Image: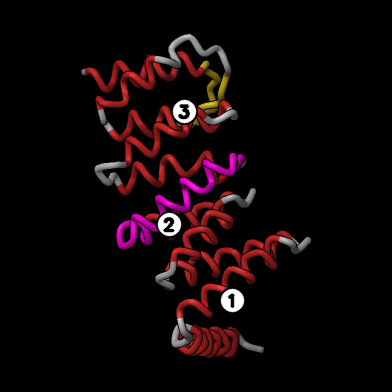
């Protein structure tokens, strides 16, 4: 097959994909949310990492288009994947949903906190909330400071600093003597700091 023929195959596949997606989205939202939620769980149970990434990345986009509260929970499950590319897709989808239906995302986050969820999603969520920056964002992010995992607490601290909400200072002050260590991505390298050090830096930034 020539390069031109391969290109024609790609164009045809794109046409079929758009047509199939448009047909899928005509289904009733509640039923569609069940189908997509089940597809997320099925994808996460696969053994082939390439297939998992392919399916979850596509499902993140599809879930974001269905206006039901269940889809926010499904996106949190996708966000909990170990693959960074999948998490980027899920985080971007959650931000898009939160701009339109913040209450759905906030309630899904609250449910995750109440369950005591841990893992990649809980480290990403403070940043998702901070990016949307609703008036109640600081209140929700501060709940991550009580998480049992140091890395989740660290994400919460950094997200509060980026949010720039001085009302978070009292909550951060409680962590100033916390000696648990976390890894920080400083762009070109990874650094280690205690939660107390992170909290002190955040307080300094918020009080300036």
Task: Indicate which disc, 1 or 2, sits on the residue closer to the N terminus.
Answer: 1
Kind of element beneath mark 3: helix
Residue drawn at x 43%, y 19% as measured from the top left? 198
Task: Indicate which disc, 1 or 3, sits on the residue closer to the N terminus.
Answer: 1
Most foreground residue, 110 or 16: 110
Foreground disc of the pair 1, 2:
1
How packed mark 3 is, by other alpha carbons closer than 10 Å (few <14, some 14-19, many 20 or more), is: many
* Residue 149 located within the stretch drawn in magenta: no
Which residue position is annotated with label 1? 35
Which SS does the magenta portion mostly show? helix
Expressed as whole percent of the image width and height from the top left, the position of residue 27 reads 48, 86
The answer to whether one can see residue 11 in this image is: no
Q: Within the image, what quadrant is residue 130 found in?
A: top left
Residue range (magenta) = 96-118
Which residue position is annotated with label 3? 145
The relative height of residue 2 versus residue 74 in the rendered view (above or below) is below
């Amino acid at each position: 097959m020539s390069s031109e023929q391969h290109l024609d195959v790609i164009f045809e596949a794109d046409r079929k994909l758009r047509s199939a997606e448009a047909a899928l989205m005509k289904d009733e939202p509640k039923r569609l949310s069940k189908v997509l939620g089940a597809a997320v769980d099925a994808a996460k149970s696969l053994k082939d990492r390439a297939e998992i990434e392919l399916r979850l990345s596509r499902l993140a986009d599809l879930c974001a288009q269905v206006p039901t509260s269940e889809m926010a929970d499904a996106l949190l499950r996708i966000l909990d994947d170990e693959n960074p590319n999948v998490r980027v897709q899920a985080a971007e989808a959650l931000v898009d949903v939160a701009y339109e239906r913040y209450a759905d995302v906030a309630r899904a986050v609250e449910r995750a906190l109440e369950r005591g969820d841990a893992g990649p999603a809980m480290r990403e969520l403070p940043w998702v909330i901070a990016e949307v920056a609703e008036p109640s964002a600081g209140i929700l992010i501060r709940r991550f400071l009580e998480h049992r995992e140091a890395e989740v607490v660290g994400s919460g601290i950094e997200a509060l600093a980026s949010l720039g909400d001085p009302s978070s200072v009292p909550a951060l002050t409680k962590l100033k003597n916390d000696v648990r260590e976390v890894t920080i991505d400083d762009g070109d390298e990874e650094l280690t700091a205690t939660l107390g050090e992170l909290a002190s830096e955040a307080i300094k930034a918020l009080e300036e």
